[in-house]
Image (cartoon, grey):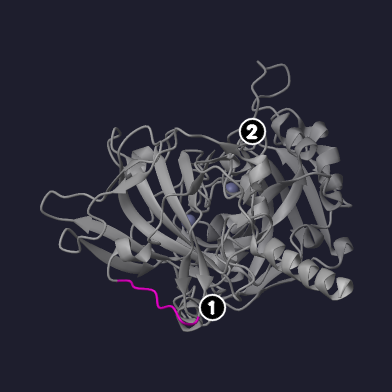
Amino acid sequence: MELDVNLKPMKISGLERTKNYRLELFNNGHSAQVNVDGDVYVEGGGLPNRFQTAQFHFHWGRDDNTGSEHLYSGGSFPLELHVVNYNVKYGNSSNAMTKVGDGLAVLGFWFERSDSDNPVLTPLIKKLSSVQNADPSTKVPVSDLDLGKVISGNLDRFYRYSGSLTTPPCYESVIWSVFQTKIPISSSQLTAFRRLKKVPHGGKTTALVDNYRPPKTINGRKISISFPSGVATVSARPANWAANVNSQCGGSSQSPIDIPALSSTTYDSSLGLFTLSSFGDTSAYSLDLSNNGHTVTATVSTSGGSNLDVTGGGLPATYRAAQFHFHWGASASVGSEHTKQGTSYPAELHIVCWNTNMDNLSYALTQPEGLAVLGFFMEVHDTYTLSTFDIQSLVPPDISKYYRYPGSLTTPGCDESVIWTVFQSTITVSTAQMNKFRGMKSDTGGSTPLVNNYRPVQSLGSRIVKQNFSGQSVNHASIILTLVCAAVYQYIIR
Ligand SMILES: [Zn+2]
Ligand SMILES: [Zn+2]
């Protein structure tokens, strides 16, 4: 996707005066459509002309996992609103819709599930029951719906591409703008859409759901964005991933987690030592570094039959290293995905390995125990310099002590396929090296720093964190406290 600075904010005029237009709702058997009769115009946003608003309608699914016509990174939304506008130079919408390239401008808005009703939708939701049966001649006024408020505040961040109508005759006459900010809608409001019927009154009951067209291939078409992309677009609100991107992100075994004190973890003597094969043999593999806007990833390619295999460590199979990547913060106080007793580290390394009993990485990452990710906290010490020549020297010399728990990918789809290992020993890097990470950019324009690319910790739930070492772990804070107490005590008894 390319940032296009010519995509200025969209301007919609006329909506602010609800008296100036009439809205009529009807059920056409395919959607709930609202005709807009009045002087409402859309311009700006890189559109070639002024467009007049003709109607808006919705697409929705049978449940919250489907519904939207446009997907984001493969994820659906439960509802999508299309505001259809025609180029005024073509006079009316039926004429304009046949004009390839610039006939229509459709504004798409995704909805995300919210806990409470969105009050600005209430006037529309209340009228849906009056058009429950498919009958284009039953038109119901929705005079108190304020479309401007429904879509307010969303108009400066959108995706742009040239496309078609999503229903036959599918004329390629549409300039699409799909807005980034989602509109909240509650479960019960979504249910009101799902109660509509595809058939006229008296017909066999057929629920009007899943009225979306599956996504079409992009075929080299350019998608432009009006705002810098990267972490800011996907990761800014991981709390909403479950509703927005993939429902798996709301599962009960999600990662990362906070690793609790040893009193709350379980010692498991069966968790043996790891063997990392070929990790230090730089002739066996090469690393391709890439910045995908979310992280820096080093992809492992091997040659000559040797593989970077991980065995032992209580893993149920041999796992093969496919890539490693990092998570880091804008400052040293945040950055790691896992935390330890509530404390973040400035960065965290993840070595992603897949179960060699499965066909390949992409299959394994959707399967239980498909992946084993080795996680290492990174600490800043100015006297240390991180070696990046090979993965062996990247990981700490002592990998004998670790924590183990079942978890997930920390980015959508959040598949719960990961056996997580978080090591006790940390990797040390210098401040200068950390600043190299913080200087990376998350967009092609190079203006947005790529920082804070971590997902917040998820609830441990009923899962147990195991550790493979026994004995007391004394943290530095308690040592210092002991020393302070000793000093104070010494002072008092003198
Ligand atoms: Zn549509
Ligand atoms: Zn990661």
Mark 2 residue crowding within 10 angstroms, few (<14) / some (14–19) / many (20+): some
Per the image, label 1 sits on a secondary structure element best described as loop
Q: Quadrant of residue 266?
A: top right
Q: Nearer the viewer, residue 76 or 432?
A: 432
Compared across the picture, whether 347 is left or right of 477 comes to left
Residue at 76 percent across and 57 percent down: it is: 37
Q: Nearer the viewer, residue 204 or 136?
A: 204
Q: Nearer the viewer, residue 33 or 436?
A: 436
x and y, in percent, of residue 108 in the image:
61, 56
x and y, in percent, of residue 439 in the image:
49, 81
x and y, in percent, of residue 214 in the image:
47, 42
Q: Which residue is mark 2?
A: 63
Q: Quadrant of residue 248?
A: top right
The magenta region covers 382-388
Q: Which residue is mark 1?
A: 449
Q: Quadrant of residue 465?
A: top right
